[in-house]
Image (cartoon, rainbow, N blue to C red):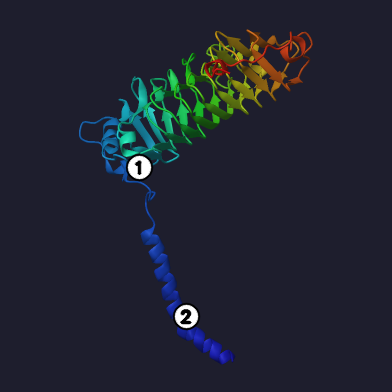
Amino acid sequence: MQIVERRLATIFAPALAAASLLLFASCVTTAPSVPSVIDASAADFPRLTGETDDAPRLQRAIDATTGGVLYLPRGDYEIASTLVISNRCSLLMHKSATLRAVAEMEYVLRVKHRNIWDHLDFLCFIRGGAIDGNGLASCLSLESYWRQSLDDIKIFNGKRYGLYVSGGGGEIVANGLYFLCRKHGLAGNTAMFLQGNDSHYTDVHILDWTTGVVVKGCSNRLTRFHVWGGSLPPARPGDIPEMLPGSTAFRIEGHSTLLRDCYADTAQIGFDIHDAWEVRILGCSYFNNRDHGLNDLLIVRQTGNSGALLVGDCVFTRTSAQERIRVYEGNGFVKWRDIIYAGGDWSGVERPDRDAAPERALESPNAKLAGE
């Protein structure tokens, strides 16, 4: 029996080896050099004679990919003039691909899609990579869009804005965005300025922008945001970190905005509600890192024609008894529910859910419009 097994092994071994080699060769030769979902690659659009930056060749690549997907391989792309997407082109960027401004301009990248509804070409996207304003430009502007996706994008050093969303569309779905400033001289900027409606933003980190988020559009949902500051050193020795004076984590000016599981971490004002109705702040937190020297803190402010504000299931932390902090300033049209006061001694600080006058009824203007 052993002799028969050895003879069979001798006969079939060469054939099995050859089959394995053919299978390996097939796998190697058929493996794509770029993702199979793409229609074009920026690598196929080189700089032309006389071009000193990458904006012209990338614009040619975008213009050649109407309704398709353009892939940007890893590398730094020098941008001296604004790139414009108006043809429903989507960008798939290697995680180590960076569009970096090398000259002053308004934005590094503008999205101004045409004819989306004519083609029913929804779900255009920008995915991966980084957009770096480099202190010279704002980073990304969405101006004409519908059901646009933004995923896993790093947004750096915007001069005025990181992401600017105009009122020219709705239904943005954004996940995994990371905003960071590492250049001095940008105090006063805003990471996210959102005028569009009916959109969802999830799992967003914002580090060292003077204002984290401004919401002006209606019916937007912000979930699991962490807005924090203080890691960028002071511009001058002895000052507090550069982006913290006058800082606001969340400013809400749009009706029916929902913040859920959001974290205002070391900002002068945590949640600033202005001229907005039906805002809900649920499961959110406020914390101030006392090591950065920021003081005169306000957790919730409600101004203008604001009403029907619900603040519930939140944790507010006081890190020092010497910290000058107020929980609330406003017109009183707010309902408090199950607030946890953590950290240091809160004696001497008015806590509106416990110490203030009875809450007013939260009447929404929508009830009046509906005739209820």
- Name the residue at 42% across, 74% down: 19
State which quarter of the image contains the C terminus: top right
Task: Give the vertical position of 191 relative to 20 (above or below).
Answer: above
Task: Name the residue located 52 percent from the left edge and 30 percent from the top edge.
Answer: 201
Is 58 displayed left or right of 194 in the figure? left
Number of residues whose C-alpha sits closer than 10 Å to that of mark 2, classed few (under 14), some (14–19) or many (20 or more): few
Q: Which residue is the extreme one toward the left?
A: 49
Hey, what amino acid is under mark 2? Ala
In which quarter of the view is residue 266 placed? top right
Q: Are marks 2 and 1 in contact (CB under 8 Å)?
A: no
Q: Which residue is mark 2?
A: 13
Q: Can I make out residue 118 in this image?
A: yes
Of 345 and 315, nearer the camera is 315
Residue 145 screen position, x and y as percent: 38, 30
Residue 24 shows which numbered tag?
Answer: none
Q: Is residue 132 above or below residue 345?
A: below
Name the residue rendered at 55%, 9% in the picture: 305
Q: Position of residue 194 (x, y in %)?
A: 47, 22
Placement of 28 over or under 109, stated as above or below:
below
Q: Nearer the viewer, residue 230 or 366?
A: 366
Q: Residue at x 41, y 62 (%)?
A: 27
Give, as a three-letter code, the residue at label 1: Val
Disc 1 marks which residue?
69
Q: Position of residue 34 (x, y in %)?
A: 37, 49
